[in-house]
Amino acid sequence: MKQPSIKYLFEPRGVAVIGASRNKNKIGYKLVQNIVSGKFNGRIYPVNPKGGRILGLKIYKTVNEIEGIIDLACIAIPAEFVFDAVKECAKKGVKFLVVITSGFSEIGNIKEEHEIVSFAREHGMRVLGPNIFGIYSRNSMLNATFGQKDINPGNVAIITQSGALGIAMMGRTKTENIGLSAMVSVGNKSDIDESDLLEYLVSNRETRVVMIYIEGVKNGERFVRVMKESTKKKPVVVIKAGKSKRGAMAAASHTGSLAGADEIFSDIMKQCGVMRAETVNQAFDWCKFLAASPLPKGENTVIITNGGGIGVMAADACEKYNVTLYDDFEVMRKIFADSVPSFGSVKNPIDITGQATAAEYERALDVALHNKKIHSIICLGCETAVLNSDELSTTIDNFVNKNKGKKPFIFSFIGGPSFQKVIDGLKHEGIPVFSNVDDAISCFGAMYADYKNKKLKTTLSNYLGPEELGMNLNRIKKIINSVKRDNRAFFMSHEAQELMRAACIDVPKLYIATSMKEAAEYAEKIGYPVVLKVVSKDIIHKSDVGGVILSLGNKNEVLDAYEVIVHNCKRNMPNAKIEGIEISEMISSGSEVILGARRDNSFGPIVMFGLGGVYVEVMKDVAFRAFPLRKREAWDMIKETKTYRLLLGVRGENRKDIKSVVYTLLKLGIIVKTFKEISDIEINPLKVFDKGDYKKGEGVNAVDVRILLSNPVRG
Amino acid sequence: MKQPSIKYLFEPRGVAVIGASRNKNKIGYKLVQNIVSGKFNGRIYPVNPKGGRILGLKIYKTVNEIEGIIDLACIAIPAEFVFDAVKECAKKGVKFLVVITSGFSEIGNIKEEHEIVSFAREHGMRVLGPNIFGIYSRNSMLNATFGQKDINPGNVAIITQSGALGIAMMGRTKTENIGLSAMVSVGNKSDIDESDLLEYLVSNRETRVVMIYIEGVKNGERFVRVMKESTKKKPVVVIKAGKSKRGAMAAASHTGSLAGADEIFSDIMKQCGVMRAETVNQAFDWCKFLAASPLPKGENTVIITNGGGIGVMAADACEKYNVTLYDDFEVMRKIFADSVPSFGSVKNPIDITGQATAAEYERALDVALHNKKIHSIICLGCETAVLNSDELSTTIDNFVNKNKGKKPFIFSFIGGPSFQKVIDGLKHEGIPVFSNVDDAISCFGAMYADYKNKKLKTTLSNYLGPEELGMNLNRIKKIINSVKRDNRAFFMSHEAQELMRAACIDVPKLYIATSMKEAAEYAEKIGYPVVLKVVSKDIIHKSDVGGVILSLGNKNEVLDAYEVIVHNCKRNMPNAKIEGIEISEMISSGSEVILGARRDNSFGPIVMFGLGGVYVEVMKDVAFRAFPLRKREAWDMIKETKTYRLLLGVRGENRKDIKSVVYTLLKLGIIVKTFKEISDIEINPLKVFDKGDYKKGEGVNAVDVRILLSNPVRG
C-alpha cells in the first residue's frame, strides 16, 4: 500500500494521544501537557476509554469517535494493548504512529513488533518507535514528547536512538541555549529510521544542521546513500557510542541492534561526509556553531592572539582539526604591519603581544575582516595587566554585531573571574566564544568539513559499471554456480583465479599438472621461477602439510618439488584426494597490498584496502568504504592509509599504479554487490607494479585470492 | 661557589622589590601590592632611588641600605639596569633573583643574559627568569607576581614557561576554584628550570600535584632523571604546545628555546610517568581531581548509570583512558541484585534503568562503596521524568560527605536547567562532577596513571652497565679514533661491524677480498648465499652505482658478481678508489626491526625502536626513550609499538627473541652516552630470530649498520 509522505510526521494536521491521562505522574498526561503548552498549530485529540476532560480538552473514549483528520497518533498505553490501538488507527486513516510504549524488541518481544509494523504498512501507516520519548517539530510547534516542556525553537535537528540520553540532551539544549528545529526519538527503529527522517530534515528550511545519536545501523545501504546526499546540502553530525569492546557489548545488551565494528563505521561516515563527534558536548558545540555561522569563501584562516603559548596551542589544534592557516607571510606582513608591534609576530598566529589593549584587538580584527585573502578568523586572548575585560567585551560585541554573516569568526579567552564574565556575557549574546581553545577550533574544523563537502559536490566522478571495468558477469555467475554445485563454501585457488580473470583482474599464470611431465612442460611455458602447490579440496592449509614449494628455478627443481609435495601430502594427510599440482608464476616485484570485499551486517557490501602481506595483522593499516563507491571515493580511501606512501614510491622507487588498485577495488565491490552468494573476497597480496593498463586488468596482480560463499544456513 | 638551597626561593625571610613604584599602572606597584595584600610572612623591602613610602612601607633608595636579610630580590626595572642591580644584590648576600624584566634572550639579547647568570652563580645567587611574571608560594604566603591578587591557597603547584598564559591560568584557578600551593613563571630559564623547582615541590607537603606548561626542554638528561623520581611520589601533569609543524614554528619564534620533536617528547614523558594533558582545561580538571581524591586500592572500576547510551559512552572513555572496568559478572550479579531491576543490567556498566530515583542511586552507590572488590566508582545520570534533581543532589552530597576519602568516585550528569543546577551546586561543594562524561573519566585515567607509577616504584629493575652487557668500551674507543683520524663523519660498513662486535652485537660474517680468488675463498668459508658489496670511502650510495649484488648461490655467481661490481663502479664513478669487495653472509630468516640511538638537542642520548626495512618511513611505527634506560623501560617501549605483535610471532611463527632486542637497545644507548663523538647509530634491519644468548650478542643480527660522528663544527 502507498505510504504517507514523511511531511505528516512533522506537520500533522491533527494528533491523537492514545493513553491520555489525568494523572500528572503519567506519560499520558505529560504528552498532552507538552503538546498544549507548546502551542501545537493543529488539532489535539486526547483518547482514553474513561473519557472526561484534560487541560481544557475533551477526552475521546475511542479513536473512532474523533471527527477530524488524524495524521499522527501517539500511543502511550501498555504494550499488550498497542496492537488493538493500531488497528483502530488504521480504520481512522491515521498516517503516522508514534509508539512511545516500551516492551517490544528491546526486551526480546520481536514478533509482536514485526506484526504491528507489517499491519501498519499494509494499512498505509508508518511507525516511529516503539520505545521512544516522542517527537518535536518546530514547523508545526508540536512537542509530542514527555521531555523538556519549553523548547527553544531554532535550527538544529536531533535524532536519537537512546531515549534517556535523548531527553537529557533535549534538556541540555536549554542550558546551552541551542534552538531546535526537530527532535526525534527513534528507539527500536521498527520502521522509520534515520534515513527516512533525513529526507525531510534536509529539505526542511528551518533545519541548518542535523545531529544524530546512533548505536547501530539498520539498512545500511540506504543509510549510506541518504547520508551522502544529505551532507552535500547540510552538515550532519553523528555521535556513536560503542567504540570499545566493552562499550559495544553494553550497546548490544541495551538495544535491539548490533553495533557494527567501529572502524568500519568511522570510515564509512568519512565517505559520506558525516562529521563524527567524540563526545555529546563536542556535537553540541559543532551544531550550535554551524547553525549560526556563515560558510567561509575559502580556506585561509588567521589566528589573532595576545599570547604566544595560546597561539601555539591554537596552531596545534588547527592541524588536528584540518583547519588551514594562511601562510602568505608577505601579505600578512603588509596588512598587519600597523596593528602588530615590532616584537610581535605577523606570521600566523598573528601575535599582537601581551601589550595589546582592546583597541589593538579591534584594529587587527578589522584588518583581517576586510582583507579578501583571509577567509576566517580565530581570535584568542589571555588575561593581561593591560587588557581591560570590559573594553574587550564591548569591542568584540560591537565587532560581531557590525559584521555578522560577513566571515566566520570564533573567540577563545582565558583568564580569571573578569574574563569568565566576558565569556559568559558574549555567549549569552550568541557569539561563539569558548574558554577552551581546542573546543573553539574543533568548531572551525566542523565548518571546514562542511565547506569541503559542499565544494566537492560538483567535482564528484560517476559510478563505474561492470562493463566499463571490463567485467564479464555471466562468466562470474557460471564460476560461482559450479562451486555451489559442489556444495563448497570456499573456492579452490584456480577457481578464484578464474573468477578474477572474469572480473578483469590479472593473476599469476597458472596450470594444473597431473603428471611430472606436464609439470615440467607448464613450468617451461610460464618461465622461471615458479611456485608449486598441491590441489585438493581436502587440504585447506596447504603450507602446513608441506604442500607448497616456492622459488623453483629450473626443470630439475620442479620435478623434485613435485615428488616432495606428493610425498608430504600423502604422509601428512593420507586420506586427502590429490587432484593435481598447481604450477604458477612467481611474482617477485611490486608492492604488497591487501584488498577485500565483504557483506557487512550493517552496511551491506563494503570494500577494504591496506598494507598487505604478513603486516596486515600487525599494522592494521586498513581503510573501509561502503558501496556504491565512486572512483574518487576509492582514491580517498587509499590516501587515508599510510600504505598510500608506499604506493607513491619509497627510497627512490617509482610511483606505483594506484589507478589500477582503484579499479580493482571497484571490481571487487561489484562482485560482492552483484552476487549475494559471495560473503568475502580477499586478495593478499595484491602486487602493485609501476604501471599497466587497468582496462586489461594490468598494473596489479592478484597473487593470492580467497573467496568464500555465504554460509548456506545464513544465506 | 656554593649555591643556595631552593627552599629560600619559596620561603624567603626577606624580599626586596627592586623597581617598586608608586605609579599604580606599573608592575613595580602591582608587585608590592600583591606581596602586601597576600600577607607575606617575611619582611618586604621596596627599593627605588626616589625613596618615599608605598602602601605603608618605607622605600629604600638602594639595596645596600636595607638592614635585614634578603633571600629573594624581585627585579622589575628596564633591562639595561638589571645587571647593576644584580651586582648590588650580590654585595648584600641575596640568594635568589626573580628577574621580571624582559628584553633578554627572547629578543636575541643572549650575551647579557649569560653574563648576568654567570655573575650571579659566581656570587652564590640563582636566577629565576628573566621575562617572567613572578612567583607565588603558599608556604610563605608570598605572591610576588603581577598577576591575580587573591590566590586560593591549595595543593596544586603550577610551573609555566609562558608568561601571558601563566597569568591567565592563575586567573582560571579562581574561576575553577582550584587552590594553589605554588605558581612559578620560568620564562627564559636562564638558570632555574623545571627540574630545580620540582626538587622542592615534590618534597613540599602542601603540594599534591604539579602542573607544568612547557614549550621546550633545556638540560633534558637532568629533566628526565628528576621527572622519573618525582612521578614516583606525586603526579606531574604536563601541557606542551607545539605539536604541529606550524605550532612548533610559532613556539620557536616566541621563546628562546626550540620545541623538540613532539613524538620524542611524548614518548619520553611516558617513560617518566608524566601525564600529558591535551588542553589547558584537561590539565586543570586532572589537577583539581588529583589534589582532592584518595588513591584507589586497586583497578576495579564500576559504572553506575540510569541510561544505556551514556553508559556505553563511559565504557568507551574507560578504554580510551586506560580505566579498567571490573568484569566479574557473578560478583556484580550478587551484590547489585537488589538495586537493579530485572530489565536493567548487572554487567558493568550497572544500569539501574531510567526508572531509577535518587533512592536507587543511593542503594547502588552504597553497595559499590562497601564491596571490597570494587575500588572506584563512576556514577552517571541522565535527566528523566522520575529522577528528581533536588533529591539527587542531596543524595550525592550526603554520600560524598559521609564517605570522603574512602574510595575515589566521580560523577557526570546530563540534562536541562535543573540538572545544571545539580552540577553547579555539587561542584561548588568541591565534589568532582562533570557535564561531560569524557572529562570525568579522563580524571580517572590520570588517577590510575598515578596509581600505576606508585605501584611500579618497587618493581623497577636496575640499570645495566657495559660490563654486564659484555661490551668492550676500550675496543669501541679505538675503532672510533681510527675513523676520526681519517677525518670522516661516517663509518664504513666493516668499521661499523667491528664496532658492533665490540659492543657484543652479532653481525653477518664478512670479509673483504681484494682479488677474485680471495672472494671465492671467503664465500666458501661463509657458506651460501652471500652478498657482494663494493668497499670505497668515495662511494656512499653503493646500490645506486651497481655496487651491490645479493643472493649469490655458488662460486661461479660470486666470481661473475665480483667482475660486474668492479666494472659498474669504474664506469659510474671512475674517480672512486675501490679498496676491495665485501663478501658477507646473507641473513634471510628473522623479523626485521629498526634500532637507533642518537644525541637529541633537548634530551641528550635517546634510543628508538620500530618496524624495520622499507616500512620505517611508511608506517612510522616507532617509539623513543631517553637515557638512562632500565631493562623494563626498554620492554615497555617495544610493547608500545605495533611491531611488538610481529615479534610475538604472527601466522603461527614462534615468538621472537625480544630479550635480545632489549639488550641491543641498551647497548646502543650506552655507546651514544659514552662516546660523545657519535651522533647517530642506526641498525636497519636488525634481524630478530627465535632465540639466542644475548650475552653472546645472539638472538639478533645487525644486518646493516650506519654510524655517524658529530659534525666537527658542532662537536
Image (cartoon, coloured by chain):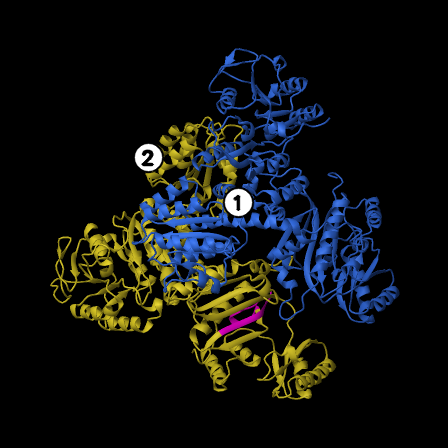
Chain colours: A yellow, B blue
Residue name at image x 75 percent, y 48 percent: B670
Residue A58 is left or right of residue B277, and the answer is left
Residue A12 inside the magenta-drawn segment: no
Q: Tag 1, which chain? A: B
Callout in the foreground (2, 1): 1
x and y percent of residue B101 in the render? Answer: 57, 24
Residue name at image x 85 percent, y 67 percent: B525
Which image quadrant for residue A518? bottom right
Residue B105 is left or right of residue A627, and the answer is right
Q: Is residue A697 visible?
A: no
Q: Which residue is mark 2?
A: A402
Q: Tag 2, which chain? A: A
Q: Which residues are magenta?
A: A680-699
Q: Image height check: is B437 above or below B95?
A: below
x and y percent of residue B130 in the render? Answer: 60, 27
**How many C-alpha atoms fall within 10 Å of the one at disc 1: few (<14), some, or many (≥20)?**
many
Residue in front for this viewpoint, A92 or A621: A92
Residue A524 is left or right of residue A617, and the answer is right
Label placed on residue B681: none
Q: Image height check: is A143 above or below A601?
A: above
Disc 2/disc 1 C-alpha distance (Å): 38 Å
Q: Amino acid at mark 1?
A: Ala
Q: Secondary structure at mark 2?
A: helix
x and y percent of residue A41 in the render? Answer: 18, 53
**How many C-alpha atoms fall within 10 Å of the one at disc 2: few (<14), some, or many (≥20)?**
few
